[in-house]
Amino acid sequence: DAGVTQSPTHLIKTRGQHVTLRCSPISGHKSVSWYQQVLGQGPQFIFQYYEKEERGRGNFPDRFSARQFPNYSSELNVNALLLGDSALYLCASSLQTSGRIANTGELFFGEGSRLTVL
Amino acid sequence: SQKIEQNSEALNIQEGKTATLTCNYTNYSPAYLQWYRQDPGRGPVFLLLIRENEKEKRKERLKVTFDTTLKQSLFHITASQPADSATYLCALPNQAGTALIFGKGTTLSVSS
């Protein structure tokens, strides 16, 4: 079975540009979450989508947005890129059946998209 | 807001020894706590989940404890091997239950 897939794996942008990152969850998973991981830190929550609706948002500026499509895949968009946006962006899917993570629920992560902003 | 502290950024041990990693949290007590393994340049991989009413959980050479009074979880790897070298992340749900909050991780190096 295919795991969580993310694209692109690596990309380089310059300040002020925008970027779109894509994620396909494991088949049957309706929840997708996005996390940002800066070097040396743990993943930090950005968004959770369940059944195409935003169910949670972390402490990130409005430059960050996301959406989930009818096939449960998701996009993360970041506008007006700053140097500090350089990070590994992780997508995770789970089997939860509501907007809340079930107490049996592990997150299945993709390998991430490594964004470098110059 | 919830804060997580993992005891040290790096832990070096010899093959065959037991590695013990610590995760402390502040504020509210979570309904469960999870541990993940992350290799360089890869996404985290789930290892174990322990619920608030469970004192201990085991999986092969892994053992996790959860003390809600101390607000602490301990993660043990027995008979450690060089292949266990990785960063181990502790995570627990936010108060809304919509996301996981991760610690910074502890990087374990097992030398042969």
Image (cartoon, rainbow, N blue to C red):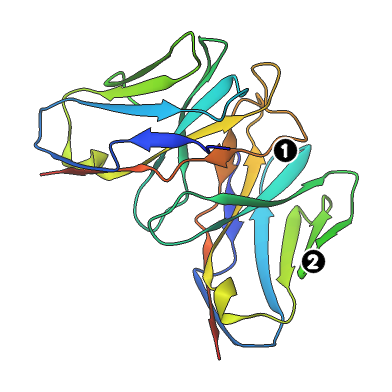
- Label 1 – label 2 distance at C-alpha: 30 Å
Name above or below for residue B2 compared with residue B108: above
Q: Amino acid at mark 1?
A: Tyr
Let me know if residue B1 appears in the view.
no
Looking at the rendering, in which quadrant would you find the C terminus of chain A? top left
Q: Quadrant of residue A80?
A: top left
Q: Amino acid at mark 2?
A: Glu
Label 2 CA crowd tier, 10 Å (few <14, some 14–19, many 20+): few
Q: Which residue is mark 1?
A: B28
* Image point (62%, 80%), residue name: B81
Q: Secondary structure at mark 1?
A: loop
Counting residues from the start of the chain, the first of labels 1 and 2 encountered is: 1
Let me know if residue B70 appears in the view.
yes
Q: Secondary structure at mark 2?
A: loop
Q: Where residue A69 appears, x then y in whole percent?
A: 44, 11
* Image point (67%, 22%), residue name: A100
- Say whether residue A15 is left or right of residue A62: left
**Which chain is home to disc 1?**
B
Q: Quadrant of residue A104?
A: top right
- Say whether residue B89 is left or right of residue A98: left
Q: Where residue A74 appears, x then y in whole percent?
A: 42, 20
**Which chain is home to disc 2?**
B
Label 1 CA crowd tier, 10 Å (few <14, some 14–19, many 20+): few
Name above or below for residue B61 compared with residue A41: below
Q: Which residue is mark 2?
A: B60
- Say whether residue B108 is left or right of residue A21: right
* Image point (74%, 58%), residue name: B73
- Say whether residue A4 is left or right of residue B74: left
Residue at mark 1 shares a chain with residue at mark 2: yes
